[in-house]
Image (tube, rainbow, N blue to C red):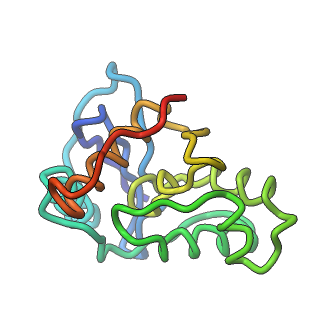
């Protein structure tokens, strides 16, 4: 397993993985030191850079999430949320075939360790409220605004309801 630190517009990200895929993209404190990028992670770093520059709307790096079968089902469904769009936790539970599993879906969403690549930030609360994000709601807000602007510049109000 290899790791590196990527200094993104949202702060430092630790990227971990191997030739089998990315296992982690998580936010770190600003005290984390930069590191060399191992070859197996260089494509991921490049694609994240392109995403933040507004040149990429999807990712082609292999991901290898670690979790339960249910968590992996939730994370796989997250990959079906189009760039620049959001769904509610209830809609996510419905997509998985069990509307009563809203809390379990929310918990699994919160356990996602491959931020941005597996877009858990695209899941919002009922009524459009921003709720829960491991990197902090300000980052979720930033990501959603970034995607809304890149999705159709000037066509959408990129303001997100206040939390």
The image shows residue 32 at horizontal and vertical percentages of 33, 26
Q: Nearer the viewer, residue 98 or 31?
A: 98
Q: Say left or right for 102 vs 6.
A: right
Q: How many marks?
A: 0
Residue 10 in percent (x, y) is at: 30, 35
User: Which residue is at the front of the view, 163 or 47?
Assistant: 163
Left or right position of 46 against 102: left
Q: Residue at x 55, y 38 (%)?
A: 134
Question: In this picture, is 158 found above or below 139?
Answer: below
- Residue with the most extreme right position: 100
Q: Residue at x 44, y 59 (%)?
A: 1
- Quadrant of the rendered image containing residue 70: bottom right
Q: Quadrant of the C terminus?
A: top right
Snapshot quadrant of residue 151: bottom left
x, y percent for residue 141: 40, 38
In the rendering, at what x and y percent does residue 17 appear? 41, 61
Task: Reply above or below: 29 against 132.
Answer: above
Q: Residue at x 87, y 65 (%)?
A: 100
Pick the residue in front: 26 or 124: 124
Q: 3 or 62, which lies in front?
A: 62
Residue at (25% x, 43% y) in the render: 6
């Amino acid at each position: 397993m290899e790791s590196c630190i990527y200094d993104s517009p949202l702060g430092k990200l630790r990227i971990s993985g191997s030739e089998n895929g990315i296992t982690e993209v998580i936010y770190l404190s600003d005290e984390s030191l930069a590191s060399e990028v191992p070859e197996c992670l260089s494509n991921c770093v490049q694609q994240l850079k392109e995403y933040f520059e507004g040149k990429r709307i999807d990712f082609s790096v292999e991901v290898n999430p670690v979790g339960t079968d249910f968590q992996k089902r939730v994370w796989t469904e997250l990959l079906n949320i189009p760039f620049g769009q959001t769904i509610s936790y209830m809609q996510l539970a419905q997509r998985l075939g069990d509307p009563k599993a809203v809390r379990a879906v929310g918990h699994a969403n919160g356990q996602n360790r491959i931020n941005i690549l597996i877009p858990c930030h695209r899941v919002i609360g009922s009524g459009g409220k921003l709720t829960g994000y491991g990197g902090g709601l300000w980052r979720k807000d930033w990501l959603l605004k970034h995607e809304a602007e890149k999705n159709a510049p000037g066509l959408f109000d990129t303001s997100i309801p206040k939390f």
